[in-house]
Image (cartoon, grey):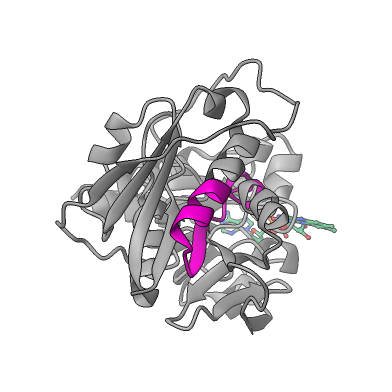
Amino acid sequence: MSNVLILVDHVGGIVPRAVGELATFGKRVGSVTAVICSSKSADLISQLSTFAIDKVIVCEGVEFEKYSVSATAQALQTVIAKESPIAVLITSSARGKEIAGRLAVRCESGLITDAIDLDSSLVATQSVFGGSTTVHSSVSHGVPIITLRSNAVDVVQDSNTPVVENLAVTFDGVDKAVVTSVEPAVKGGRPELTEASIVVSGGRGTDGNFAPVEEFADLLGAAVGASRAATDAGWYPHANQVGQTGKTVSPQLYVACGISGAIQHRAGMQTSKTIVAINKDPDAPIFDVADFGVVGDLFAVLPQAIGALQA
Ligand SMILES: Cc1cc2nc3c(=O)[nH]c(=O)nc-3n(C[C@H](O)[C@H](O)[C@H](O)COP(=O)(O)OP(=O)(O)OC[C@H]3O[C@@H](n4cnc5c(N)ncnc54)[C@H](O)[C@@H]3O)c2cc1C
């Protein structure tokens, strides 16, 4: 049976839901082998128990902390040589894409990034040019390396206990650039923007008051996004900007509050499964991509939605 490798990339020892999505895509193609590259693997293995994973390969070493992406790419190359997988799937985060690019160069393989779907023949779907064009492509050279956007598929749960193997990796070809210290950004209790299944965003229509946007987001367990008008005005951090020059999100639910829907904003959220727009202008372009729209003042609409959720 064809074997698909998935990378268990983790942030601060937490395995994100996106790894379950990679396993779900992998199962469409064959059996799934998860690769853990870490200095502390035990906690990570237990977090994979509900995902559709047949085997776990653990590459352990302090090098993963020191050399980070280049060490991970080298470890994956070693696993590919041992397992001869039919494909390698990696999450489409900035880090995931860097690992994928380095791995593709090492293995002289074709690379597809930012896929939103993958079929059983390893044909990937990408949404490009601000969501106006859908591309289907496949890799014709080497082991296909494909990065998949978070929230692209519902995670299939599986209670199988995977076989766990350890694999020694020799790190003699890693880059000379080393990570000297890692300081995780101070986070609130909200989920990571690119991984959240619900995103509530505010734009110029908030007039700088994000309080109702944040309160609504917190009730839904959502991440908070912002348009560039809002981030350029200093109302919200640039790290939360959604769009062409910000982050690309593809959540199950995207709620745009006081955002006009400029093409550059839509480029970052158009593949969301369900889009809800709250805007007082009935002709705002955001309504062209919205599944549900509320024409009204967000300062009147959001408190009612908050009240309904609290009730
Ligand atoms: C090269 C380039 C890159 C860019 N990259 C990005 C990007 O990454 N992300 C991004 O977002 N933009 C980006 N932009 C900017 C983009 O073109 C728009 O200017 C920006 O998205 C507008 O933000 P906005 O919708 O919040 O503001 P506006 O376009 O001013 O819209 C505000 C909306 O709020 C509504 N409104 C006002 N008050 C209320 C209220 N009380 N209740 C409800 N609705 C209200 C208005 O009807 C209006 O539709 C980029 C532009 C360029 C040129």
Q: Nearer the viewer, residue 146 or 133?
A: 146
What residue lies at 73% left-to-right and 49% top-to-bottom?
A: 229
Near-viewer residue (94 or 129): 94
Give the magenta range. 76-98
Q: Is residue 51 magenta?
A: no
Q: How many numbered discs?
A: 0
Please tell me whether residue 9 is drawn above or below residue 81 in the rendered image.
Answer: above
Q: Is residue 212 above or below residue 271?
A: above
Residue under the point 71% across and 61% down: 108
Q: Is residue 291 visible?
A: yes
Q: In the picture provided, is 305 more to the left or to the right than 290?
A: left
> Where residue 305 appears, x then y in whole percent?
34, 56
Q: Residue at x 45, y 81 (%)?
A: 119
Q: Position of residue 173 (x, y in %)?
A: 69, 35
**Depicted 182 relative to depicted 270: above or below:** above
Q: Position of residue 286 (x, y in %)?
A: 61, 71
Q: Report ligand 1 position as a quadrant.
A: bottom right
Say whether residue 94 is magenta: yes
Front-lying residue, 103 or 80: 80
Given the current orientation, which residue lies at the most extreme top position? 180
The answer to whether residue 277 shows anywhere in this view is: no
Displayed quadrant of residue 32: bottom left
Residue ID at (48%, 70%):
86
Quadrant of the rendering where the N terminus is positioned? bottom left
